[in-house]
Structures are given as structure tokens and as C-alpha cells.
Image (cartoon, helix red, strand yellow):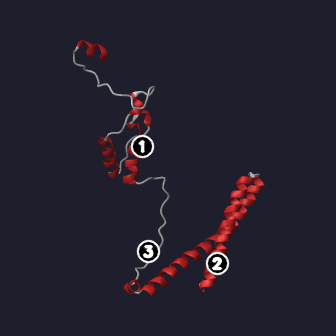
Amino acid sequence: MVMAAAASGSPVDGPAPSANVAGPGVDAAEQRVPTLEGVTAVASAAQEGASMPASSSPGGDVPAAWSLADARVAGDDRTPPLRRSEAEPATPAWQLDDHQAYARREQDRHQAAQRAFVAAAEQALPELDQQIARGRAMGLSPEQLAKGEEKRRRIAEMQARLRAGLAASGATP
């Protein structure tokens, strides 16, 4: 009909022809691109606490842009809850003004992080040993066992290095 109307010189009343941007064999319903208005509607609906129904697009799938807009406003429900640590007290002005006092403060913080790693490794190493033993009993491949053993070796090596560094500096590990 479009070809006949175009050939006869009369105006075309049907939809405007569009180029197939996805390539041959892909129909027009599969190459829909969300419009700015659609994304804005999703964002405003998400701000109001509603989300777009799954039937708003062909096939019941929500376009990625709509899902992204919803996640940016309302968050992603698959994200685990954040566990915030205690708020760190503000650094006193005298410590910020004195170079040696600030350097001691930074060294103390660094050593605290090292002690935390040593303590975490104390708990992780026995768990890794159990997992490696369980993997052997289950008949895991030597490559998979080697990965676990390498991980355990590197954690133990780092723990020993940090313990030695803490002991040399006079800090208790």
C-alpha cells in the first residue's frame, strides 16, 4: 500500500517507514527503544513509590532503561543491606596542625587495620582448611584444590608478614 501510494503521488496515510536498525530478521516490536518520556514516567512513578507494571512492554519484560531508572531512584532490592561501622570521632585540630601527631595518628590507624587483618585471618584459615578437606573428600579436581590451597597459603603468608611488622614496631598483634 505504501509503495502504491508513493508511486501514485498521493500522500501516505500509514505509519512512517522506519529503518531496521537491529538488522534483517528482527521485527519492529523487538527494536523498540524507550523514549525520554517513558524513562521520565518510570522515574517519577518510582519516586511516588510505584513501579511500572511488567505488562507495559511487549512480552512482559521491562526495558533495561526503565529498570535502571527505577533502581536509581528506589534502589535495587537485590542489594544486601549495608552494615555501617561506628562513626569515627573527628580529628582534633591540634592533631591536624602538628605534623608528628598527625603521622602518629595515621600510623595507629594503619596498625589497627593490620591487627584487624591478622584477627580475621585467625578465623578464616581454619575455615579454609575445612573447605579444602571437604573438597578433597568430594573429589574436586587438583586445579580447584590448588586454588584453595594457594589462597590459604597467601593469607597465612600475609598474616605472618603483618604479625612480624607489628611486633617490630612494638605494637601488639
Q: Identify whether 135 is placed above or below 121.
A: above
- Residue 13: give x, y in percent of width and height: 25, 20
The answer to whether residue 105 of the structure is visible from this angle is: yes
- The mark that comes first in sequence, 2 or 1, is 1
In the rendered image, the quadrant that contains the C terminus is bottom right
| Closest to the observer, 33 or 40 | 33
x and y, in percent, of residue 96 in the image: 39, 83
Question: Could you classify mark 1 by the number of other residues whose Cα lies within 10 Å: few (under 14), some (14-19), or many (20 or more)?
Answer: few
Kind of residue sitting beneath label 1? Ala
Residue pointed to by mark 3: 87
- Where residue 97 sits, quadrant-wise, is bottom left
Locate residue 16 relative to residue 28 in the image: left or right: left
Amino acid type assigned to the residue bearing label 2 in the image: Arg
Which amino acid does the dot numbered 3 rest on?
Ala
The image shows a total of numbered marks equal to 3
Residue located beneath label 1 in the image: 64
The CA distance from mark 3 to mark 2 is 27 Å
Looking at the image, which residue is at 40% across and 33% down? 31
Mark 3 is surrounded, within 10 Å at the Cα level, by few (under 14), some (14 to 19) or many (20 or more) other residues, namely few
What's the residue at 42%, 32% (across, down)? Answer: 22
Asked if 134 appears above or below 13 in the picture, the reply is: below
Q: Position of residue 106 (x, y in %)?
A: 48, 80
Task: Name the residue beneath numbered marker 2.
Answer: 163
